[in-house]
Image (cartoon, helix red, strand yellow):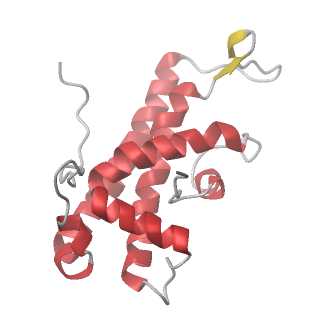
Amino acid sequence: MATALFISRTDLVRNTIIDGSVDTDKLIPFIKIAQQMHIQNYLGTELYNKIAELITAGTLTPGANPDYTLLVNDYVQPMLIMFAMVDYLPFSNFAVKQGGTYRHRSENADLPSKEEIDFLVQKYRDYADFYTRRFIDYMNYNASTKFPEYYSNSNDDMYPDGQANWVGWVL
């Protein structure tokens, strides 16, 4: 089954430091990963599936579904863009090809250090946390009246996470 993406490659390029020449095939997997891991975590399975159904049906429009359109455009998409960057950046220098795993090299540029990549990842994680807090605040005031799916998860569904701050791995 194909995944209905909540953002496009264009959304990612226009709202981040990604250059327009980056291959779409390099970006789409990270959009999917961020959407399935991070966004579904905050939406919960039922609301996530509802939005995916609206996108697939072509009815995520202000005229047909104004509340869902506002939710996706103003809250979900900004979160997803930032989370996609968090997931993409650590892999951006690498390519896996028939001969093995390679690190990209450019004749007129320097490769960033691990610390510099970690800095960028942390900045995008901070942005993602900001948009996630906005989303959670919006849902706290509107979910019960506008988005019944937010509270209708059951059994093995993912339940919405109400915490916006990523504090790192706890071992």
Q: Is residue 6 left or right of residue 66?
A: right
In front here: 16 or 161? 161
Residue 147 vertical position relative to residue 23 in the rendered view, above or below: below
Q: Nearer the viewer, residue 1 or 123?
A: 1
User: In the picture, which quadrant includes the C terminus?
Assistant: top left
Q: Residue at x 37, y 43 (%)?
A: 37
Q: Is residue 90 left or right of residue 161?
A: right
What residue do we see at 54% from left, 58% from top? 7
Hey, which residue is sitting farthest top in the picture? 99
Q: Residue furthest bottom?
A: 63
What residue is rendered at 56% in x and 75% in y?
58
Q: Is residue 83 visible?
A: no
Location of residue 105 by image quarter: top right
Residue 39 locus on image (x, y percent): 36, 52
Query: Is 3 on the left or on the right of 28, as rendered?
Result: left
Image quarter of residue 11: bottom right
Q: Residue 65: tell me if it is visible.
A: yes
Q: Relative to residue 95, is residue 27 depicted above or below?
A: below
Looking at the image, residue 158 sits to the left or right of residue 39; the answer is left
Query: x and y percent of residue 155 in the render?
Result: 16, 51
Between 3 and 164, the one nearer to me in the picture:
3
Looking at the image, which residue is at 39% across and 76% down?
68
The mark total stands at 0
- Against 55, is 42 above or below? above
- x, y percent for residue 40: 34, 52
Q: Position of residue 131 (x, y in %)?
A: 35, 57
